[in-house]
Image (cartoon, grey):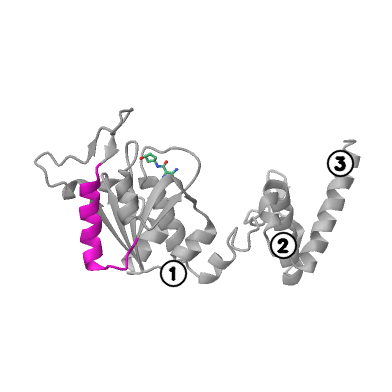
Amino acid sequence: MRFDILTLFPEMFSSPLRESILGRAIEKGLIHIRTLNIRDFALDKHQIVDDTPYGGGQGMVMKVEPIARVIEWVKSENPSARTIYLTPQGEQFSQEKALELSSSSHLILLCGRYEGIDERVRELFVDEEISIGDYVLTGGELAAMVVIDAVSRLLPSVLGSDRSAEEDSFNNSLLEYPQFTRPFNFRGCCVPGILLSGNHSAISLWRRKEALKRTWVRRPDLLAKANLSDEDRGLLEEILQQSKTDQVEDGA
Ligand code: 4FV
């Protein structure tokens, strides 16, 4: 999979994407990441990439011409590349969206700065807009990194075993169950015995119940859209009963 990142700060991408899993995926040629400096596509003597907003107002706006040139340059290599603009006005990024994008072969990620981009870039070149969250960053670069990370780890053989991506949080829209590793006893806090029982069906049942409980407590909105089995509904019933008992015991 190819990622072309259009940015005014290409060096921001030098180290974050070169470490660990993504770094290995790049070495193995599973993903190709190229950064293109939008300023290199500003042909005027001073390579101006931003200007004051028509109609007045604070801040600067990124000019349409340099962005148009760099996108057309990339699309001249591959017309089917998909252009994504990272912006708080975009569709909320999610595991579902990451899964969808992981089937693309070539993504162009446009990183805004200042107050954003000239609206005509959207009208003429942007295929879709993605937001990583309802907060304002200084630039779209960190959002682009988030998208590249979440999408790349879903590509075949990027993670050690493809199985682990399937078990991700959100993949079946439940939060993950608690994880434990050695030591068994840390300052008196011990690992749940079931996990050392070797009884794998009992262990997976415990994990499913813990995932349901955690999702019910922390993200009931996810539970509403999860495809629950009859067994899940039975486990949820136990969880609700238990919480009522706990409340009674705590005299709530
Ligand atoms: C952002 C977000 C984000 C807005 C103004 C860049 C900044 C500046 N991008 N998800 N949240 N972008 O805050 O994607 O141009």
Q: Which residue is mark 3?
A: 247
Spatial CA distance of label 1 from label 2 is 29 Å
User: Which image quarter has ligand 1?
Assistant: top left
- Drawn side of residue 93 relative to residue 50, left or right: right
Q: Which residue is mark 2?
A: 208
Which stretch did the figure color magenta?
63-82
Q: Which residue is mark 1?
A: 103
Three-letter code, disc 1: Ser
Residue at horizontal 34 percent and vertical 69 percent from the top: 28
Residue 44 occupies quadrant: top left
Residue at horizontal 37 percent and vertical 37 percent from the top: 138
Q: Is residue 141 magenta?
A: no
Residue at horizontal 62 percent and vertical 56 percent from the top: 181
Spatial CA distance of label 1 from label 3 is 47 Å
| Location of residue 202 in the rendering, given as x and y in whole percent from the top left corner | 77, 67
Q: Residues within 10 Å of mark 1 (few under 14, many from 20)?
A: few
